[in-house]
Amino acid sequence: MDGDDPGTVLILGGGLMGLAVAHALARRGQAVQVLSRRRSEAAGFVAAGMLAPHAEGLQGPLLALGQQSLALIPDWVASIEADSGLPCGLRPCGIVVPFPSASDRDGFATAAHGVPLDRAGLERELPGLAPSWTAGLLFPQDGQIDNRRRLMRALERACSRLGVGFSEGAEVEGLDRAGDGALQGVRLRTAEGDRRTLPTRRAVLACGAWSARLLPELPVFPVKGQMLSLQAPRQALGRVVFGPGTYLVPREDGLVVVGATSEAEAGFSEGLTPAGQRQLQAGLAALLPEAAGWPPMERWWGFRPCTPDEAPLLGPSPVPGLWLATGHHRNGVLLAAVTARLLAATVATGTGEPQAASALEPFRWDRFRELTPQPSLRQP
Ligand code: GLY
């Protein structure tokens, strides 16, 4: 296995964040090795690929981070396409959020960023939308990317062409720390069952929903999502439709990705459930009745990495030399570009470029501590 050079940056996790950070580091000339337990489980292969800081109604620093990433995406995608020779399936098609009333629309967190629609406007944008939706917001700046079929593959190819090493089936079981607490290696179990330690002074933890298994201090937990795809008539939908609890993401070739349940109570329980699939079917019928008759193509599930405030954990970790790129919850595809940019700027220099450091500050891993009452302040 490559990566025995302690100067190599180890990426713990081969999902979208791991690949995106590996790619950005490799573009800076850094030696990188990606260690991945089972890439097929990665949320990057599960998500619908919406680029939706406004349609998701993000707020505060998370909205700002999402907008920053949205602005980076065209160049980021161009760099992946150039490095891989593969298309990523970026589709700046806009997203429509329907509402039952104009007052619901006007109270939406990001209403000021959208174009208000009345019923006639909704029918123009989304022919066939159920009549109960009388108002809407069009976010022309939001869009989608074909993460499952294109982006993940293109990123992987781009990384390998830039010399990134991959170890699939390598489970990181622990971190080796020096006397001063700093990272000095990672302990892993290979696909063949061998146990060994890879020396390193720099690593990036991008283990998604499984992050707390490696570092229990991290407040990351799984939120299961079930999805399905439908084969629609080509051009049946021109825009993403983002309804409450259900969304439809039309790919260029007529495939429509439908999401998603949001099941925090499911923990890591695997598999589809009849209740989850019924929920998607009901959401579909309530949004676009015609779509309930389109033939299903595939059904799948995965685990979003969530945190208490639903924003990611980015930057330094409790272990010097280990950086975090995890906890992206519902917005991993959107946030991959900015995560890659900020993490690469920080990890490549060891200490971090000041601009990247201040952008990462609102997403530090220990921000929740301030919310926990200190023992001395607790009531008896
Ligand atoms: N970004 C949508 C979802 O996580 O379901």
Image: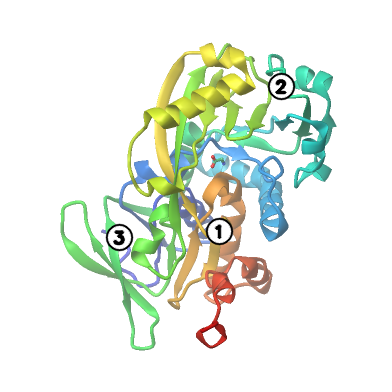
Q: Amino acid at mark 2?
A: Ser
Label 3, on which residue? Answer: 2
Q: Residues within 10 Å of mark 1 (few under 14, many from 20)?
A: many
Count the numbered circles shown: 3
Residue occupied by mark 1: 312
Q: Residue at image x 50%, y 27%?
A: 280
Image point 21% across, 66% down: which residue? Answer: 196
Q: Which amino acid type corresponds to the residue marked 3 in the rendered image? A: Asp
List x then y, in percent, for residue 205: 43, 63
Quarter assignment of residue 55: top right
Left/right of residue 63 with respect to residue 201 in the rendered view:
right
Across and down, in percent, residue 162 comes to 46, 51
Label 2 environment density (alpha carbons within 10 Å; few <14, some 14–19, many ≥20): few
The residue shown at (30%, 61%) is 172
Instruction: Tell me the amino acid under the disc marked 1.
Output: Pro
Q: Is residue 350 left or right of residue 39?
A: right
